[in-house]
Image: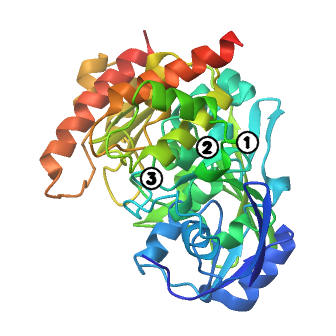
Amino acid sequence: MRVTITVNDTEQRHEVEDRTLLVHFLRETCGLTGTNTGCDTTSCGACTVLLDGESVKSCTVLAAQADGHDVTTIEGLSTDERLHPVQRAFQECHGLQCGFCTPGMVLASVSLLQENPSPTEREVRDGLEGNLCRCTGYQNIVDSVLTASREETAR
Amino acid sequence: MIPAAFTYHRAESVDDALRLLAEHGDDAKLLAGGHSLLPLMKLRLAVPELLVDVTALRELAFVEDAGPEVRIGALTRHHDLANSALLARAVPLLAHAAGTIGDPQVRHRGTLGGSLAHGDAAADLPAVVLALDAVLVLRGPDGTRDVPAAEFFVDFFETALEPGEIITEVRVPKQTAGWDFQKFTRRAIDWAVVGVAVAGDAVALVNMGATPLRATAVETALAAGAPLAEAAERAADGTSPADEPAASADYRRHLARVLVRRALENSRA
């Protein structure tokens, strides 16, 4: 089938198999390999992207379901070489170790902060329950999200 | 993991979906969020030839005050149930339980009707609608029919839904008594090893048999005036929990008694 998906503000029109998963569409068809495939079972959250601004696990969404919708991947967060505030906070607070979960963590955090701009630490931990860090680097990830929240609300 | 090949069709209306179900019978499956069905398709445990995506049918996504009850469209997402001010006020058990399903990403996609139609006894919402004495509205080629939750869950992943039918809405009586929801999971995002929904004197169990169950022995004891702890001791009566390496049947029966006691106490606190 032919799908038209706006990925990072760019219209992507492609012929895909009906069974194509969104994560494969992004990585293989669009060449956007910032979105990682981790567990492939809706558990780890490494493949998290924004679909119409909300976090989803792209290994459990069909490209066909995203037809006509907007997708934001990690490549689309920064603008004009300026990092997104959440990316900046992850950098400042060293919210990563090996980096594999980071794109998903960042996008889940962006979605969380859109829904709840000033979360408590507990709410950050609950809000990121769908994302696993195999390095167990959660402390700095939570600090990063809280830092991003404070910087955004201070502006 | 990639699903076996299928044809995808995005339904334009409920009638469109019903027509396709009538044409394709068992070869067609409805996609109502996809967070149970797509994982099964990736494992090739489900191999539909036609996937009818009803997720975009916005006319089935609503939460409406209807006097003594709340009408909820079948395609209302878990995220929207959890964030509904009306539900928080009128059916807080449902709003709370919906907010504990899976994780935020799952709640952004999964829907009430999808979860109920899937009929998984380990899922939270089937037990919640059972505790709430909700009524499911099913639409098929011959019109609509109302099915009480108590008659909807028939057996292991089997419901009263006929192949040509779709759940259009769920009607839930407004809560007037205390409630609580307890579930025990191995990790935050896992299915419940055992769960308990309490609404007044109604007690329903997650994952204690082939279907969600009412803990009738507990309810009978409560009606006879038994103290909460004593009533909770009956939580596993008449259940048939799965015996698995990660959780034996005995362990599940123990959990049911503990969680029912906690839920009853919290509901009356």
Residue kind at label 1, given as amino acid type:
Asp
Are the residues tagged 3 and 2 within 8 Å (C-beta)? Answer: no
Residue at image coords 32%, 22%: B262
On the same chain, marks 2 and 1? The answer is: no
Q: Where is mark 3, residue-wise? A: A46
Structural crowding at the residue carrying mark 3, measured as other residues with C-alpha within 10 Å and reported as few (<14), some (14–19) or many (≥20): many
Q: Earlier in the sequence, mark 3 or mark 1?
A: 3
- Establish if B195 lies above or below B73: above
- Establish if A73 lies above or below B264: below
Are the residues tagged 3 and 1 within 8 Å (C-beta)? Answer: no
Left or right: where A48 falls relative to A73: left
Residue kind at label 2, given as amino acid type:
His
**Residue A94 in view (yes/no):** yes
Structural crowding at the residue carrying mark 1, measured as other residues with C-alpha within 10 Å and reported as few (<14), some (14–19) or many (≥20): few
Residue at image coords 65%, 82%: A18
Q: Where is mark 2, residue-wise? A: B78
Q: Position of residue A62 (x, y in %)?
A: 62, 70
Task: For marks 2 and 1, give the one nearer the viewer.
Answer: 1
- Between residues B7 and B27, which one lies in front from this camera angle? B7
Total tally of numbered discs in the picture? 3
Q: Chain of mark 3?
A: A
Q: Position of residue A138 (x, y in %)?
A: 34, 31
Q: Chain of mark 2?
A: B
On-image quarter of the C terminus of chain B: top left
Specify the label residue A80 is tagged with. 1
